[in-house]
């Protein structure tokens, strides 16, 4: 893709996100979401492969439907209350339609079917954008309307998302699909707590973005698209594969690593809200996700190919992304000890 075109699309993504997260008026928020959608479409379809074109078409149709529902929800609310302010969403029907629209945009169960297919048709870097940056504006809209949302509906969708995200990721061999189901599972954790402690949802999202960026960039560095290629990564880049193991375990939420922090705080908050059964169900369902993270980690570090490869070990490469991978992986492994400071800031 032309560098100038790529720059324009990247600036448009930034602009659309900024408009949505800083607006108080529903029409401005909707405009930002539309700019975002139109900016990401060329990045999805840039390879001109039939699968990429199909992914871009699916993404456009799904996001257009969700945007229409956002507009319909805000208009219904304005019709009944005379308010276009995002924080003044009080009409029950409008709240229900908005929850549906945002769930479609995020890929929450039962509106998750488009997300693994779109991610599979995109490149790894575009997949990273779809899993992180494109989820930020809808999450902020949920954050701003959190006081009006239906907790029972969100809890049901959250538990289904964690269950299906873990269950459907079990038999996948494509790395991008595994990361898509991982994203669906993490979104379940975020959506269950948004009514009770919205700041905790944002903290979870920031740490999820950090860990996912580390994993996606590591996969991109080793050119890994499926598990069979991940098995040869250790022979080429042993140090990166070792770090990838820890980043994946952090994404799974194992205790000494950063990923444990949001899960710990969410379980604590749910227990405070007398929702211990929901916390227990989420904890048990996250074991499903742990299985496929361990599978990825096992393929990256323990499984060696049957024949020795002739590759030189790349102890030092001159790629500029390596510094970024180093920073992100360090952060996604070591932030748990400073959790009191993180919670104080957020």
Image (cartoon, helix red, strand yellow):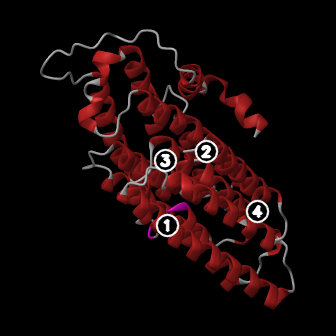
Report the disc number at residue 157. Answer: 1
For the residues marked 4 and 2, what is the alpha-carbon distance in whole angstroms?
Answer: 16 Å
Residue 120 or residue 183, whichever sits in front: 120
Element assignment for label 3: helix
For the residues marked 3 and 1, what is the alpha-carbon distance in whole angstroms?
Answer: 23 Å
Q: Report the magenta residues as a range.
A: 106-110
Question: Dot 3, crowdedness within 10 Å: few (<14), some or many (≥20)?
Answer: many
> Residue 240, image x and y in percent?
42, 19
Name the residue tied to disc 2: 204
In magenta stretch: residue 108 = yes
Name the residue tied to disc 3: 127
Quick check: marks 3 and 4 in contact, CB under 8 Å?
Answer: no
Q: How many numbered discs, if any?
A: 4
State whether residue 284 appears in this view.
no
Earlier-in-chain disc, 4 versus 2: 4
**Residue sitting at x 55%, y 47%:** 267
Question: From the viewer's perspective, is the residue at label 3 or at label 1 nearer?
Answer: 3
Earlier-in-chain disc, 3 versus 1: 3
């Amino acid at each position: 893709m032309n560098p100038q075109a790529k720059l324009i699309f990247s600036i448009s993504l930034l602009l659309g996100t900024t408009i949505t997260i800083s607006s108080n008026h529903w029409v401005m928020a909707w405009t930002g979401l539309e700019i975002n959608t139109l900016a990401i479409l060329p990045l999805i379809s840039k390879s001109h492969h039939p699968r990429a074109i199909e992914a871009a078409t699916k993404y456009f149709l799904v996001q257009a439907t969700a945007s229409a529902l956002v507009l319909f929800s805000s208009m219904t609310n304005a019709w009944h209350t005379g308010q276009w302010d995002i924080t003044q969403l009080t009409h029950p029907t409008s709240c229900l339609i908005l929850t549906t629209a945002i769930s479609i945009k995020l890929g929450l169960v039962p509106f998750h079917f488009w997300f693994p297919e779109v991610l599979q048709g995109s490149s790894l870097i575009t997949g990273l954008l779809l899993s992180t940056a494109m989820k930020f504006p809808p999450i902020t809209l949920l954050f701003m309307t959190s006081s009006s949302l239906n907790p029972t509906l969100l809890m049901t969708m959250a538990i289904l998302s964690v269950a299906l995200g873990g269950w459907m990721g079990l038999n996948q061999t494509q790395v991008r699909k595994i990361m898509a189901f991982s994203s669906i599972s993490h979104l379940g954790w975020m959506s269950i707590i948004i009514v009770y402690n919205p700041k905790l949802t944002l903290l979870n999202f920031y740490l999820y973005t950090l860990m996912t960026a580390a994993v996606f960039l590591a996969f991109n560095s080793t050119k890994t698209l499926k598990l069979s290629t991940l098995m040869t990564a250790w022979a080429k880049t042993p140090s990166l594969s070792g770090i990838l193991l820890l980043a994946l375990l952090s994404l799974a939420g194992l205790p000494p690593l950063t990923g444990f922090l949001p899960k710990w705080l969410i379980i604590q908050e749910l227990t405070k809200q007398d929702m211990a059964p929901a916390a227990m169900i989420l904890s048990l369902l996250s074991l499903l996700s742990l299985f496929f993270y361990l599978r990825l980690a096992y393929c990256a570090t323990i499984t060696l190919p049957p024949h020795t490869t002739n590759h030189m070990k790349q102890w030092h490469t001159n790629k500029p992304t390596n510094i970024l991978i180093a920073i992100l992986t360090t952060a996604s492994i070591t932030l748990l000890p400073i959790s009191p400071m993180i919670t104080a800031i957020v």
